[in-house]
Amino acid sequence: MRPSRGFSLLEVLVAVALFALAMGLAYGGLDAVVRGRAQLQEEAARLAELQRVVGLLERDLRAAVPRGVRLGDLRQLPALLIDPDGIELTRSGHANRLAQPRAELERVRWTLQEGGLARTRFVALDRGGSERPREDAVLQGVSALDVEALTLDGRWVNRWPLPGAREDDWPRAVRIGFEVDGLGRIERVLELAEAVQP
């Protein structure tokens, strides 16, 4: 019988080195998969937030009604107001889950504020000045906001109402575009309800 022989020191070192190399490659691959998954989850959450905001904006525009707003100082705001700062409109369908005695109309304004898209809601449609609006920071990372209205003769204008227009004039559609960091330009064109057009 020959005596059993173990591994030499050199063979053990080579085996350990190969094992360490294999573990390093496996860890690098696993780390890349974990980081990729986290990035995908973050982008999916950002996209879901964007879809929620675009849906809310669409609901506001589809529910627009031609009802102006009277202010406490006897000024009147038109039913739809588009200026370089954003868009303000009166919308129907204001939820009333507690069945309180109040109107189902609501005034909302979409503007660009501090690097984000903000939606402001006014509790009272006609306001005397003491009511505080409710502001929601809707979407962060928005760098530009453009709003245009399509006139009845087919022109896109960046202000509404047009100078000299009648009080009941209503655009055919509204186009809203905004730049979202990391996602590019988002643009929606929404035709306003036929029922409210003159």
Image (cartoon, helix red, strand yellow):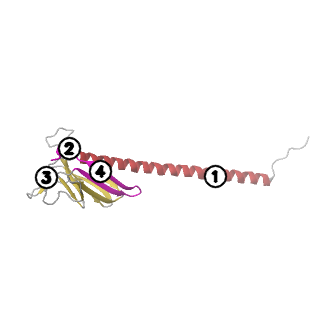
Q: Earlier in the sequence, mark 2 or mark 1?
A: 1
- Return the residue found at the far front: 153
Q: Which residues are drawn in magenta?
A: 172-198
Q: Is residue 48 magenta?
A: no
Q: What mark, if any, has residue 69 been given in the picture?
A: 3
Q: Identify the amino acid type marked 4.
A: Val
Tell me: 85 left or right of 51: left
Front tag of 1 and 4 = 4
Residue 137 lies, with reference to residue 93, above or below; the image says below
Q: Earlier in the sequence, mark 1 or mark 3?
A: 1
Q: Position of residue 49 (x, y in %)?
A: 36, 49
Q: Earlier in the sequence, mark 4 or mark 3?
A: 3
Kindly indicate the quadrant of the structure image that contains residue 148. bottom left
Q: Nearer the viewer, residue 77 or 198?
A: 198
- Return the residue found at the far right: 1
Q: What mark, if any, has residue 189 been given in the picture?
A: 4
* Cβ–Cβ under 8 Å for marks 2 and 4: no
